[in-house]
């Protein structure tokens, strides 16, 4: 079935599929057609009947008609020079290179021939689109004057072959022909477009020597010199030249302002803009558009919008470029809804969109997956006649693909007369995102045979598609094929592999790819770093975090606020709160995420006082706290036992900041009350929570009940946890124990049976630690090396000598413990600590990750070891981060 959209003529009504669509864009109307009066229509018809040589002077020898004149020449009739040149002009006017070639063949019949005749031939070929023929005539000329060189250079300039324009200039100088005020600006334009500053300086010097900059009448040359310096990024030279100009017009100001915008010096550009107005030169629409476009490109659409409003208040009518720049800028800065609103406003203002405007609006629909809006824009593109634009077609393919309408996208793709690399990439990307890697690969193969070269984006789309669909081997095969095919792998290629490794749960491979990436001299970007850092948020990855941090500093990425925030968060979670503080304190500016990451990190490490101080500092600096920060500060109050202050914060959320509490805030309040022994109050709070309590909330109540020995509340919490997590071995053991203590033996036996029938295996604890860049696993009851066994014996001896009382779990209190060491052997964290004391330098903290909650006995012993051996020990279990230092723990013995 053919796509009904593409069968429509621009003058047809909306295609049938859209007849019943709601008018989401109420102002989508076809442009007004120009009404041709009968008089003008008649005149137009008469003009069509005139011969092609109408613009030529009448030739008495041949009756004044081009074809008759050419026929006469081909029969050997001589022709005067001026008549022959008039015939060549007729060929230019009619864009008839064939007639021009016939005239060229009769060149020998021209009487009193001079270099201007061949110059006209050069011009004819260049203007009729055959630079090769033009160059051949030019090369065969015995004498070439300024007009000849101007014709040749003009031809290459029209084709935008700027490098050859510069080459021709040097050839011209070699023959001793100097450019004039008409030719020099074209050569300067070539220098601007090729960034050829050296030749531009030479032309500037030449213009000075020829006196072309002295007269106020020669503003065109001066403006071209200024534009050359500005476009080549030489702002200092441009400014010096600008200040010395005897006469500055609007073009001069536009060039200097555009140069500053191009180099990102926007404040200076605005100052020049204000100075321009102060000197009595009112900016035109081009000046305003330069600034608006520049601010949009630099991700500052708000200021661009302000300028657009000022433009209107200054009485300058916004043109299609103004609106398109603004719509495109909003879309590129992820403000899609605003882009579509502005598109409607543009239609209301009576400015007709062009293909670029429509394509930008369709792209906004693609990002929003707004299919109905996209369909209506599709219909509008048909009506205004821009549907055959490749840019519009590409946007439509992308929009339909992102809206899961791949059949529509494919139909548009197949019916597009001209497909560029973006067309193919949009279609391939659509299939890979939808998981149809087979269809994507078919297009990938067809693309090469179609004559459109696959670029790095094409390969990246295929690699990303295979990774997302779990086919890592195929992705790696394409990755290696890129090198064979001569496609340079860019940062996005490597980022795709890194993201794939992390997605597949292999952070070590992601880090290896990161290192290989640098070895291949591919510079990682912020996306690379922001992908890697979250994978390092554990105690064993601190050296990897420092490696990434070193790269960030070497490449001046630390000023990127998102990277700095991620570093603060990652250092905190990997156990280095001091490094997190250093990064935070070094930030030139801080956003809400910066404060949130630092405060949460301090709370995680038990630095509650510092967290509260930072919260107060943040408020003094005028930063409005969000929900996440309130949750962290409530937990900080809980660590310090500040119940009233915590309650006040909780109420201030709604009363002062109009933030509704979430489960994380209720969990913080239960922890706050539980740490202070207010179990009944905590239990009542849960009963009155307006949202369904989750496992974290019941766990918070359970912890309080366990610490204070309230078996009734512990049983209540464990029962609810069992409903939420029926297959959690820890929950099963806990509930069985709680119900046994609470006197519900029947229920306890049911839980025991449920546990047995569910075949849930309880596992003993195990630990991991990194020593000499190797991760070592310790299991409860496993054997240590001789040195570590001796160290463990020494530890036990020194603890006995301290006469410290080690809590003894006798079964009368509710605990969530591993089995007794008398049954299963020494717990894994003790083994790991002993091994760390033997094998790690004394200045390095012992970092351990444990699979189950640390028991009370091991917790107490770790506190004693940190005091006796003056060693910092960090243990992360599923419940908490324990930072043992000087005989205390960051959890304050509450976990």
Image (cartoon, rainbow, N blue to C red):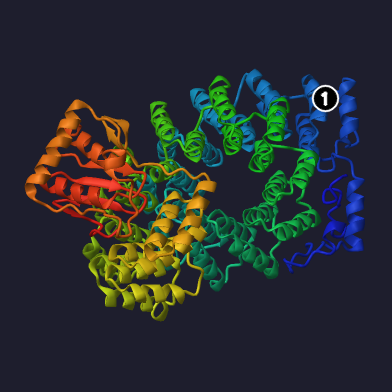
Residue at screen point 87% across, 30% down: 69
Image quarter (top left, top right, bottom left or bottom right) of the C terminus: bottom left
Where is 890 relative to 686, above or below?
Answer: above
- Please tell me which residue lies in front, 178 or 201: 201
Whether residue 801 sits left or right of residue 463 in the image: it is left
Residue 864 image point, x, y percent = 15, 49
Exactly how many numbered labels are in the figure? 1
Residue 586 as seen in the image, left or right of residue 763 = left
Q: Is residue 166 visible?
A: yes
Instruction: Indicate the quadrant where residue 159 lies.
Output: top right
Q: Is residue 147 above or below residue 741?
A: above
Q: Position of residue 287 (x, y in %)?
A: 52, 59
Q: Quadrant of residue 278?
A: bottom left
Q: Residues within 10 Å of mark 1 (few under 14, many from 20)?
A: some
Mark 1 secondary-structure assignment: helix
Q: Quadrant of residue 36?
A: bottom right
Front residue of 325 and 313: 325
Q: Is residue 380 left or right of residue 463?
A: right
Q: In the picture shown, does residue 854 fall above or below 666?
A: above
**Quick one: 781 or 128, which is closer to the camera?**
781
The percent position of residue 469, horizontal first and vertical second, equals 61, 37
**Residue holding disc 1:** 102
Point out the image quarter for the N terminus. top right
Residue furthest to the bottom: 655
């Amino acid at each position: 079935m053919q796509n009904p959209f593409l069968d429509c003529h621009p003058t047809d009504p909306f295609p049938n599929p859209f007849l019943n669509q709601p008018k989401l864009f109420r102002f989508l109307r076809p442009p007004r057609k120009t009404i041709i009066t009968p008089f003008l229509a008649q005149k137009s018809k008469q003009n069509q009947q005139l011969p092609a040589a109408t613009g030529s002077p009448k030739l008495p020898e041949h009756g004044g008609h081009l074809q008759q004149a050419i026929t006469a020449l081909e029969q050997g009739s001589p022709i005067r020079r001026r008549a022959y040149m008039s015939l060549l002009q007729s060929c230019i006017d009619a864009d008839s290179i064939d007639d021009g070639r016939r005239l060229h063949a009769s060149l020998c019949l021209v009487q009193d021939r001079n270099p201007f005749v061949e110059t006209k031939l050069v011009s004819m070929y260049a203007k009729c689109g055959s630079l090769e023929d033009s160059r051949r005539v030019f090369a065969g000329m015995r004498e070439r004057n300024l007009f000849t060189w101007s014709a040749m250079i003009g031809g290459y300039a029209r084709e935008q072959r700027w490098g050859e324009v510069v080459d021709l200039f040097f050839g011209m100088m070699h023959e001793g022909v100097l450019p004039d005020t008409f030719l020099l600006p074209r050569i300067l334009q070539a220098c601007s477009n090729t960034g050829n500053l050296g030749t531009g300086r030479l032309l500037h010097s030449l213009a000075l020597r020829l006196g072309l900059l002295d007269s106020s009448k020669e503003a065109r040359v001066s403006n071209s010199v200024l534009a050359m310096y500005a476009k080549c990024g030489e702002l200092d030279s441009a400014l010096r030249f600008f200040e010395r100009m005897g006469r500055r017009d609007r073009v001069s100001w536009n060039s200097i302002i555009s140069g500053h915008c191009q180099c990102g010096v926007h404040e200076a550009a605005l100052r020049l803009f204000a100075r321009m107005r102060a000197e009595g030169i009112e900016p035109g629409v081009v000046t305003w558009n330069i600034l608006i476009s520049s601010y949009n490109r630099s991700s500052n659409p708000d200021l661009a919008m302000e300028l657009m409003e000022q433009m209107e208040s200054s009485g300058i009518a916004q043109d299609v470029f103004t609106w398109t720049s603004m719509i495109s800028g909003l879309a590129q800065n992820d403000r899609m809804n605003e882009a579509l609103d502005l598109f409607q406003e543009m239609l209301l203002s009576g400015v007709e969109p062009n293909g670029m405007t429509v394509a930008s609006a369709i792209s906004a629909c693609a990002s929003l997956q707004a299919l109905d809006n996209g369909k209506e824009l599709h219909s509008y593109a048909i009506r205004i006649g821009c549907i055959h634009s490749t840019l519009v077609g590409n946007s439509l393919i992308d929009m339909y693909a992102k809206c899961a309408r791949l059949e529509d996208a494919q139909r548009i793709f197949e019916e597009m007369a001209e497909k560029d690399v973006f067309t193919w990439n949009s279609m391939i990307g659509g299939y890979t995102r939808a998981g149809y890697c087979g269809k994507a690969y078919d297009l990938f193969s067809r693309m090469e045979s179609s004559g459109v070269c696959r670029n790095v984006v094409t390969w990246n789309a295929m690699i990303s598609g295979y990774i997302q669909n779990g086919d890592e081997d195929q992705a790696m095969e394409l990755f290696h094929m890129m090198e064979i095919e001569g496609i340079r792998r860019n940062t996005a290629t490597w980022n795709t592999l890194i993201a794939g490794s992390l997605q597949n749960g292999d952070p070590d491979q992601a880090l290896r790819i990161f290192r290989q990436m640098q070895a291949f001299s591919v510079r990682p970007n912020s996306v690379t770093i922001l992908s890697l850092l979250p994978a390092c948020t554990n105690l064993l990855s601190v050296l990897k975090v420092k490696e990434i941090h070193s790269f960030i500093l070497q490449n001046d990425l630390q000023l990127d606020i998102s990277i700095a925030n991620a570093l603060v968060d990652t250092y905190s979670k990997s156990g280095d709160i001091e490094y997190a503080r250093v990064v935070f304190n070094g930030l030139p500016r801080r956003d809400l995420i910066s404060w949130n990451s630092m405060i949460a990190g301090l709370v995680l490490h038990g630095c509650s006082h510092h967290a509260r101080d930072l919260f107060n500092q943040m408020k003094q600096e005028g930063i409005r706290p969000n929900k996440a920060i309130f949750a962290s500060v409530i937990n900080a109050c809980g660590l310090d036992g500040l119940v009233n202050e915590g309650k006040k914060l909780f109420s201030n959320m709604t009363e002062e900041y109009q933030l509704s509490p979430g489960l994380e805030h209720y969990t913080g309040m239960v922890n706050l009350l539980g740490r202070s022994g207010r179990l009944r109050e905590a239990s009542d709070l849960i009963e009155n929570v307006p949202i369904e309590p989750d496992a974290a909330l019941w766990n918070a109540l359970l912890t309080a009940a366990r610490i204070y020995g309230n078996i009734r509340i512990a049983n209540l919490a464990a029962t609810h946890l069992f409903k939420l997590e029926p297959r959690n071995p820890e929950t099963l053991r806990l509930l069985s124990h709680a119900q046994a203590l609470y006197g519900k033996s029947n229920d306890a036996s049911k839980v025991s049976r449920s546990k047995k029938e569910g075949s849930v295996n309880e596992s003993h604890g195990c630990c991991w630690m990194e020593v000499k860049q190797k991760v070592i696993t310790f299991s409860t009851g496993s054997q240590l090396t001789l040195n570590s066994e001796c160290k463990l014996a020494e530890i036990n001896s020194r603890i006995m000598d301290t006469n410290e009382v080690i809590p003894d779990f006798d079964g009368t209190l509710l605990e969530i413990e591993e089995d007794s060491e008398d049954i299963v052997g020494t717990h894994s964290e003790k083994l790991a600590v002993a091994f760390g004391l033997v094998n790690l330098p004394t200045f390095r903290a012992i970092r351990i990750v444990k699979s189950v909650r640390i028991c009370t006995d091991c917790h107490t012993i770790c506190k004693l070891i940190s005091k006796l051996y003056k060693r910092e020990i960090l243990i992360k279990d599923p419940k908490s981060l324990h930072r043992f230092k000087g005989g205390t723990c960051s959890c304050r013995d509450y976990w």
